[in-house]
Amino acid sequence: MFKFIVLLFPLSIFANTQVNTEEVHPKGSKGEVVENPTLKTLSGALSDWSLYSSYSYKGGSLEKINSAERPNVRNKEAKPYLAEFTGNLGLKYRLTKQDNLSIQIGIHSTTPFHSNLETDNSQNQSDYDKYGQKTSGDDPTISYFRTYYIGDLQNISFFKYAYVTRDSYREYGGRSIFQYSHAGAYRINKAVYIAGSLNYENYAYDKDTIEYFGRDYNIRESQPEHKYRANLSAEFYLSRKIAIRAITDLFSYTRYRDQINPEEDKRQQTLATTYFFNRDISIAPSVKFLLEDLRADRTNLGLNLNVNL
């Protein structure tokens, strides 16, 4: 397993030293680099300039699908989250066949489809009163990403920088987020892939305290500074348009600002189905859960939409 994780963590510069990918993997129509449908969608359209967008809805549980609250799957003792819709809409420029640059502006809405909130949590009620059913611009993001092969492993690596503008994050000092993420897929046959991803996030802040009822409280211990995650998945393509993915975390760690050592998060599992309208547009409903605590009220429902034109 360790060897597999290491293989999935190539810095993009190493790809320049690989054997010419056009010779080993003949390019497809319009300069295609990889052939895994999921990675194709992540890499965006093939034209020089294109629309590059993704949208995500995080909803309730299997028990309460329409609930404005969604359980904290990893920590059942923690307060539940609020349902939310997020999106990123922007332009992508294809620098070369393999290299891409994009600039996006975010869209965010808390509880977008919920006209009321039934909760026992005072913080969620306060957040709903301030942000519920309001749509606003969200963190502008610039990213560079590269698609490539290493041997038979298909890869896409992202470097992203986001400037935090969301009110609920700014309130707690959020200023910027740097992210490195990598996804790789190995083809078993035309219907089955083994895939995996790695993700690192670094958060910067511009304040250490918040005022609450006239007093300043230190919030450093609740501000995540570094996050590390990796997962492994099996992809089954029932047809050229429909795929089922079973995903499990390999590890997940968070280090807060006043901590020396990171905290290990519980390993989460996901089942997702993806429908590919075509190469550049896909939609994927999903459910997240913990196998060790498998209950309908301990799940999260989600929906992801990618549109590249």
Image (spheres, rainbow, N blue to C red):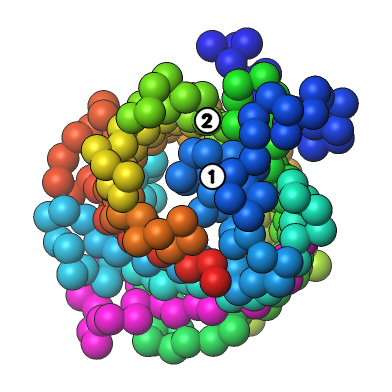
| Snapshot quadrant of residue 109 | bottom left
Q: Nearer the viewer, residue 300 or 151?
A: 151
Alpha carbon distance from label 2 to label 1: 8 Å
The magenta-colored residue range is 101-123
Local packing at callout 1 (Cα closer than 10 Å; few below 14, some 14-19, many 20+) is some
Name the secondary structure under disc 2: strand
Check residue 185 in the rendering and tell me which mark sits there, or answer none.
2
- Picture mark count: 2
The residue drawn where x is 60% and y is 21% is 152
Identify the residue position indicated by label 1 in the image. 39
Q: Disc 2, disc 1: CB below 8 Å?
A: yes
Where, quadrant-wise, is the N terminus in this rendering? top right
The residue drawn where x is 49% and y is 39% is 36
Q: Amino acid at mark 1?
A: Leu
Q: Amino acid at mark 2?
A: Ala
Q: In the rendered view, does 36 fall on the left or right side of 255?
A: left
Where, quadrant-wise, is the C terminus in this rendering? bottom right
